[in-house]
Amino acid sequence: MSNIYLIRHGQAGSRANYDLLSDLGERQAGMLGDHLAERGMRFDSIYAGELRRQQQTAAIASSRLDDLGLNPPSIVTDNRWNEFSLATVYQGLVPGLIADSPSFASDFEEMQRALIDDPHTTRGAAGRCDRAVIEAWMDNRYPDYQGDSWEGFRTRVRSIVDDFLDHDPDEQIAVFTSATPIAIWAGSALSLPNDRILRLMAVLYNSSMTTIRIRFGEPLLFNFNMTPHLSDPSLVTHR
C-alpha cells in the first residue's frame, strides 16, 4: 500500500490575510523539510492545493529535501486539496446567526476584540464562533447561502481517493493541504460523522503529518497529527 502523508500548511497570517505563511509558518515548514530530509524521505509524488499557504509550505519543505540530494519530484498542483473559505462562510452565515442567537451575537463582538490582541487566537469566543459558523454550514441551516455547500466540499475531497488507486503500492506520496481535507480523510477512514470531523479539524497542528494508506479502495489511518519536527512547544500552533 502507498504511504500518503497528508501535511497541513505552516502557520498562516491573521484572519484578514490568512492565505500567506507567517514567519513562524515558514520556520515550521523548514523544520518539517529538515526532519523529512534527515529521515532520507524520497517521495515519488508531491501534491499541493493551489492556495498560497499550501504552495509555500510544499516549496519550502521540498527545497530542504533538494538541498540534501533527495531529488524531490516537481510539486503537482491540485485544487481539490484547497481548504474551504472560512471568511466566505462567515460572511454568508453570520447575519443569520446573529439574528437567531443573542449568545452568538455577544460572542461575535467579543471575538472582534480578542482578535485585536491576538490575530491567531482560537480560544474563548473565537473558538465558539468558529464552531457555531461551521456547524451551521455543515447542517445547511441557512439554505439561501450562496457559497459552496459542506456536502459538495466533502464529496470533492473524498473523491481524490480514486486517484490514488492507480499508484504503485510501494509509492511514498506527500500532499500539502489544510486542516479540513485532512480531517475529512481521517474521518472517512474512521467512519466519523460531521461533528467528529469538526473535532478533528479543531486539533490539527500547523505543519503536522497524518499518514493514510489505501486498501481495497478505502483509506486506512496509520497515524494522525504528528509533529516530531517541532521539539519546542512554543513552535506548536493550531492557527
Image (cartoon, rainbow, N blue to C red):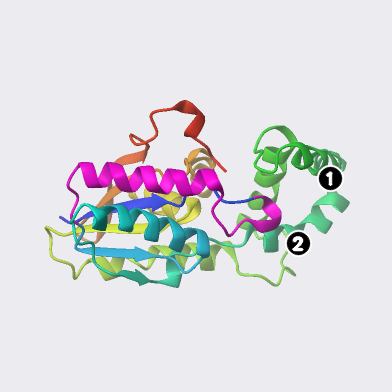
Residue 31 counted in the magenta span: yes
Residue named by callout 2: 91
Residue named by callout 1: 101
Q: Position of residue 144 (x, y in %)?
A: 75, 70
Give above or below for 235 relative to 83. above
Q: Quadrant of the N terminus?
A: bottom left
Q: Quadrant of the C terminus?
A: top right
Q: As rendered, which of 199 and 28 lies closer to the eye?
A: 28
Question: Residue 15 shows which numbered tag?
Answer: none
The residue shown at (85%, 44%) is 105
Q: Which residues are magenta?
A: 14-42
The residue shown at (72%, 44%) is 129
Along the horizontal axis of the image, is 58 left or right of 72? Answer: right
**Mark 1 surroundings: few (<14), some (14-19) or many (≥20) residues within 10 A:** few
What secondary structure do most residues of the magenta stretch adopt? helix
Measure the alpha-carbon separation of dots 2 and 1: 16 Å
Q: Position of residue 28 (x, y in %)?
A: 44, 43
**Mark 2 surroundings: few (<14), some (14-19) or many (≥20) residues within 10 A:** few
Q: Secondary structure at mark 1?
A: loop
Amino acid at pointer 1 = Ser
- Could you tell me if residue 171 is visible in this image? yes
Q: Earlier in the sequence, mark 2 or mark 1?
A: 2
